[in-house]
Amino acid sequence: MNAPIIRLFVVFMVLFAGLVGATSWWTVLAADSAQDNPKNQRDLLRSLEVRRGAITSAGGTELARSVEGPGDTFAREYAPEAESVSHLLGYSYPLGIGDAGTERFRADALSGVSDGLDTLFEQIAGGRPDVGDDVRTNVDLDAQRVAIQQLGGRKGAVVALEPDTGRVRVMASVPGYDPAALEDDDVYSDLATDDENSPLVNRATQSLYPPGSTFKVLTAVAAIDSGEFTPDSVLDGSSPQTVSATPLSNFGGQSFGPVTLTQALTDSVNTVWAEVGVRLGDETMTEYMERFGLYEEPPIDYPAGQVDVSGAYDEDGEPVKPTGAGLDLGRIAIGQAGLLTTPLQMAMIASAVGNDGVLMEPRIAREITDRDGRTVDEIEPERVRRVMSEKTAQQVTDMMRNVVDSGSGAAAALEGTGVAGKTGTAEIDVQNNINQLWFIAFAPSDDPEVAIAVTVERAVGGQGGQVAAPIARAVLESLLD
Amino acid sequence: MTERNRELFALIPASLLVTAGFAAVFIQRDDAVSDVSLTYGAVFLALCVAVHIVLRLKLPNADPYLFPLVAVLACFGLVMIYRIDDTLAREQAQWFVVGLVAFAATVIGLGDHRKLERYRYVIALTGIVLLLLPRVPGIGQQVNGAYLSVNLGPVSFQPSELAKIAIVVFLASYLRDTRQMLVQGARRVGGVTLPPIKHLGPLLAVWGLAMLLLVFIRDLGSSLMFFGGFLALIYVATNRLSFAAIGLALFAGGTWFFASTVGHVQDRVATWRDPFDDRLYDQAGGSYQIAQAIFAQADGGLFGEGFAQSVLNPPEGPPLLPAADTDLIYAVITNELGLFGAVALLCIYLLVVERGFKTALLATDSFSKLLATGLTAVFALQVFVIVGGVTKLIPLTGVTLPFISYGGSSIVANFILLALLLLISERARAEAKEAR
């Protein structure tokens, strides 16, 4: 009987080898996928034992911090000021609704997890961090408050960037929410199901709106930078004209004679810019749209799920580039025909013009510091690309100055400081007179410190120049102080 | 060096391990080494030495490595349970003493394992009654859909742990008698060697019992353990691979049939195949357990989190890992000691299995050989069923990890199993010495 006993032992060795294999599978080979499984709460639970770092405004005001909770855990506490920056800040409730915003994007730094090398070392040493780092943001609390005050309960968003660094100085979205109240799951589900107001949606990054005439800035850049036109090129501003087999009118049906491009931007002449778009052709328009960052996720330090991609969208809600797609290029050139952009994207367009033609990556966080205030990580400005030549940028700046100095954006003018801007009034529902109101700008125009995009959602009546421009003016004033 | 001196030396690392283990848990808990850890170590060593003296007196020639290996497993289990819940650890330590007493009682009281042969039908009947006890209304208890434990006043115990020994004793003695006939009466039909018809009855009865367990007791794990032990025995008894293969095919066929028709078996298989499915995950008795076991192991990685450093309980709500002290203790071990610790543990089990089969090889009479083989096989299968279940190699079912999981019946039954193995070993090795 000895031979079968030995063979039986071999069988058990094979079975045990299977156990070793299965254990290796879960501990090493498939460990990452198990750890990333949304049902796996271990990282979250462990993070409760870490004193999570604070999030502060640019001025150092504490917006979120951790306090000792039950047992060995810590609980998140939000300052009253947090409500005015709710979307930018986000929230972190590991046991409840999860996390969002900067709380989510900077979770590793906040909970003290640094890079992979440290993790491997920590694995061998068996230790884990128990204190996280602080995150200082670029947000200017005063200007942020001004933005929200100015929106005055109207749904909309304001985004203000530093053109040369990409720093996000203001990111306001109305309506907002109180991050402290979301600890209660019921409050969260009420807000999450409020489809009429969508208070949890960050309108600055997640809402896609027709940009209307503000998009003419992009068309102007394409026109001049491609060498096809100059600011002094003269086109026919009469109205209506037939574009894509349908008549297109200027605002209020006003007919202009032959006008220069500068004049056409100042008076926002639809027929001229539609003709420019058509004459540039789909390839040139696509090229400049891509250069400005449309059709790609804006490279902002904010969770991917909370950032939407701007561009022309087809009926199925899929982004479609003009190249060879047979789109109504004339109307795209004036910000219509399925073109949808986020306020962040429009601020980036203004910012690139203001930064001598170079687009920078928007940055919410400025630096990561440890508990003792030492800087662990300085967040450096990152250049996306040169969008246009310096000369084009200068010429388009001059054109945009005219809009504020003597055109539709007069309400944004600041005393003693040149403002370059563009208004937008995108018709959403002509019958009920519902428009998306816009204003984008940067100032001071000779050496820009701030670029801004303001939008008011589905306003009844009104124009961008009357409603959005004053909001931009107030925020610019606060930031340029 | 004599067997018993080797055993004594081998016990030293076990005691050091338990001392170091407790010290590690204390340090993690209180940031200070308490001399209580030394006390635990000393008490543990004293108990082991006591058992060692019993062995020295009664079984001087028995295998020297089995007891120290088991001592390592037991102390390892004690530390792990202490880390999970110190009240349970105290109870487990008491069960450990009871187990050692049962061990000594078996060694002294039985004296010669061959006496068991005389009572084979009584033992078989006892085994079957024990297995069915959990279905008796009033005392039986359903846990996680399976009927495995019995409540007698304050004590709850799992009769299947003792039943597995009884069934193996019966099968070993039955097969000793019939093995010749099984082999000689065999016919070849279409290239496959079939056992003779008249002996097919008892074999089908065992198969029926395994199927009964599956459906009636609702436990695939025990059923697999019993039937696997039976197949191992029939293979060793007859040296006919085809018998084992036929048995395996019957078992697989039966399991497949019930897995596709009986609700609770279906659920078990479904949770095994897709533990992360939302519906199964949220279902009571669904895949939450296996999913959490997987997360715990993934958390462990190569080196583990370290003693007492894994996440077991969220600040509020039920524990993260259900049955961490019993069914899922392997997941906790992997979580805290990593792949290396888990493989080391499996190696210790494999060494125990190796010593068990070695005992079977050395034994001279058929009954001893078969008994040693059967006991070792069910022991190894039990480890395979629970570790395989926790690692999702096979569907997870509730059997204990021998000597490590919390549970009185498991500890006591496995110590009796160990006592039987040592009794067989004593006889075999003594005879071998005389022959020399």
Image (cartoon, coloured by chain):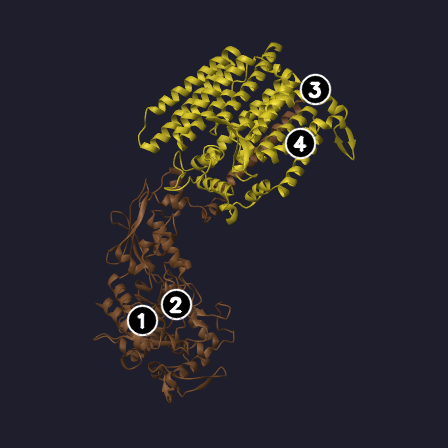
Residue B365, given in percent of the width and then of the height, sits at 65, 16
Q: Report the residue marked by disc 2.
A: A342
State the residue position of label 4: B208
Q: What SS does tag 4 mark?
A: helix
Give yes or no for contact between labels 1 and 2 (Cβ–Cβ under 8 Å): no
Disc 1 from disc 3: Cα separation: 98 Å
Residue A174 picture location, percent across and down? 33, 65
Going from the N terminus, do you reach mark 4 or mark 3 first? 3
Q: Position of residue B108 (x, y in %)?
A: 53, 12
Q: Is residue A281 above or below residue B15?
A: below
Indicate the quadrant where residue A15 lies. top right
What is the crowding at mark 2: few (fewer than 14 residues within 10 Å), some, or many (at least 20)? many
Q: Which mark is residue B97?
A: none
Tag 3: amino acid: Asp
Task: Give residue B358's position: percent from left, percent from top.
Answer: 59, 22
Question: CB atoms at circles 4 and 1 under 8 Å apart?
Answer: no
The label on residue B177 is 3
Type of amino acid at the residue the image marks with label 1: Gly
Q: Are marks 1 and 2 on the same chain?
A: yes
Give the chain coloured brown.
A
Chain B display color: yellow
Host chain of mark 1: A
